[in-house]
Image: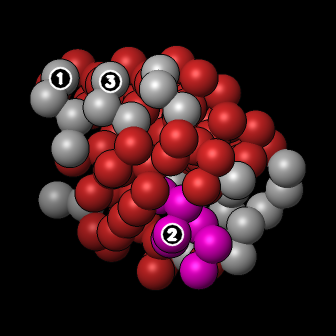
Amino acid sequence: MLDRIGRLQSDSIRRVYFQELFSQGDLNEQELDVTLRTLGRRISSDSERRNVLVHVIDSQKMGTNTVGPFMAAGQQMNSDSERRNVLIAYIKENPIPASHRR
């Protein structure tokens, strides 16, 4: 499916395909890593990227090896508010342990 996504011309259509891919069930860490890296390269629209990343939070279990590619995909967004929205959604689902708070 990633090859098909790469041939699509529209970020909004790519978003639909990525969301469908993530909705099909939990990807293993390697599949999630590759898919998040592809997302980072293929969707340039901040709002479309935010929509997919929030969907990832809701639909996938991320391990320690996939948090980096997830954050990298979010970091590539130019909009501070879209980036903030992704981080807020992530923290709601993955609270920061009390031992890591200041």
Check disc 2 and give the amino acid type: Val
Measured in 3D between alpha carbons, the distance from the residue under mark 3 to the one under mark 2, in whole angstroms, is 19 Å
**Magenta stretch: residue 82 in it?**
no
In magenta, the rendered stretch is 30-36
Residue 34 located within the stretch drawn in magenta: yes
Residue at the extreme front: 7
Q: Say which of marks 2 and 1 sits in front.
A: 2
Foreground pick, 27 / 86 = 27
Reading the image, the residue beneath label 1 is: 79
Instruction: Decide if residue 97 is in sight here.
Output: no
Which percent across, then down, holds residue 62? 58, 66
Instruction: Please name the residue shown 23% across and 20% down the image.
Output: 81
Q: Where the C terminus falls, by quadrant? A: bottom left
Q: Is residue 86 above or below residue 82?
A: below
Residue at x 39%, y 43% (from the top left corner): 42
- Which residue is disc 3 drawn over? 45
* SS for callout 1: loop
The residues tagged by marks 1 and 3 sit, at their Cα atoms, a distance apart of 10 Å
Q: Give the x, y percent position of residue 33.
A: 50, 71
Mark 1 residue type: Ser
Which labelled disc corresponds to residue 34? 2
Mark 3 Cα-neighbour bin, 10 Å: few <14, some 14–19, many ≥20: some
Q: Is residue 100 left or right of residue 10?
A: left
What residue type is disc 3 on?
A: Ser
SS at circle 3: loop
To which quarter of the image does residue 29 belong?
Answer: bottom right
Q: In the rendering, at what x and y percent does residue 71 appear?
A: 32, 56
Q: Residue furthest right?
A: 24
Which is nearer the eye, 55 or 34?
34
Image mark for residue 62: none
- The secondary structure type at the circle numbered 2 is helix
